[in-house]
């Protein structure tokens, strides 16, 4: 039998579940996952594929393994916030994934994540294929962390603005 507070904590963790972040690329897709409390994002893996269909199948397999409650996919936008040249390809892949998995998929602006991920990978002193894999995973983690932070800030705003009673 678990002590009361610990039992409550375990139930809370089970209730929230893992959120997965995706940095969808043409040849590689970086995957990140949250902790069970949905506060922190961690780089997880990379799916490599030659075609969009292979990529969708690889991502769907990773999602089955991770059993997320939500998926956050990065959407490539231009500086002005409009969809970038890769946005149609990413949207098409997301549409494919939606037919392959029952998990809700939301999109998150991914501007600047690759540049930041490159900086992180450089700081990790990685090179070549290792760096490319790390960049994709870190970019996915940055996309997911941005989503988690914005959602947390939104929830905190609702809590602070609710009437006292």
Image (spheres, rainbow, N blue to C red):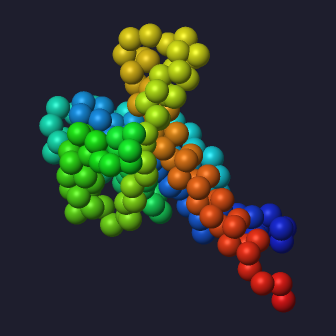
Quarter of the image where the N terminus is located? bottom right
- Give the vertical position of 57 relative to 155 (above or below): above
Residue 70 image-quadrant placement: bottom left
Q: Position of residue 3 (x, y in %)?
A: 84, 67
Q: Position of residue 109 (x, y in %)?
A: 43, 48
Is 13 on the left or on the right of 122, as rendered? right
Q: Which of 135 and 13 is in front in this view?
A: 135
User: At 49% across and 32% down in the image, what residue appears?
Assistant: 138
Residue 159 image-quadrant placement: bottom right
Residue 48 image-quadrant placement: top left
Q: Nearer the viewer, residue 109 or 140?
A: 109
Which residue appears farthest toward the bottom when viewing the image? 165
Q: Position of residue 129 (x, y in %)?
A: 37, 16
Quarter of the image where the C terminus is located? bottom right
Is residue 12 visible to us here? Answer: no
- Give the vertical position of 23 relative to 105 (above or below): above
- Give the vertical position of 151 relative to 146 (above or below): below
User: At 47% across and 63% down in the image, what residue appears?
Assistant: 69
User: At 42% across and 17% down in the image, what residue appears?
Assistant: 130
Is 128 on the left or on the right of 142, as rendered? left
Q: Position of residue 118 (x, y in %)?
A: 47, 22
User: At 75% across and 64% down in the image, what residue appears?
Assistant: 9
């Amino acid at each position: 039998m678990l002590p009361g507070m610990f039992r409550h904590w375990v139930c809370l963790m089970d209730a929230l579940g893992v959120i997965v972040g995706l940095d969808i690329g043409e040849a590689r897709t970086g995957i990140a996952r949250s902790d069970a409390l949905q506060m922190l994002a961690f780089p997880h893996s990379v799916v490599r594929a030659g075609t969009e269909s292979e990529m969708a199948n690889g991502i769907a397999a990773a999602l089955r393994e991770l059993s997320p409650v939500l998926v956050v996919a990065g959407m490539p936008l231009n500086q002005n916030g409009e969809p970038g040249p890769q946005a149609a390809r990413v949207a098409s892949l997301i549409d494919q994934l939606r037919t392959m998995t029952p998990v809700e998929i939301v999109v998150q602006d991914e501007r600047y994540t690759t540049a930041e991920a490159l900086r992180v990978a450089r700081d990790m002193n990685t090179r070549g294929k290792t760096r490319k894999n790390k960049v994709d995973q870190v970019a996915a983690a940055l996309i997911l962390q941005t989503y988690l932070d914005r959602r947390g800030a939104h929830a905190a705003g609702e809590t602070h603005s609710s009437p006292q009673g």
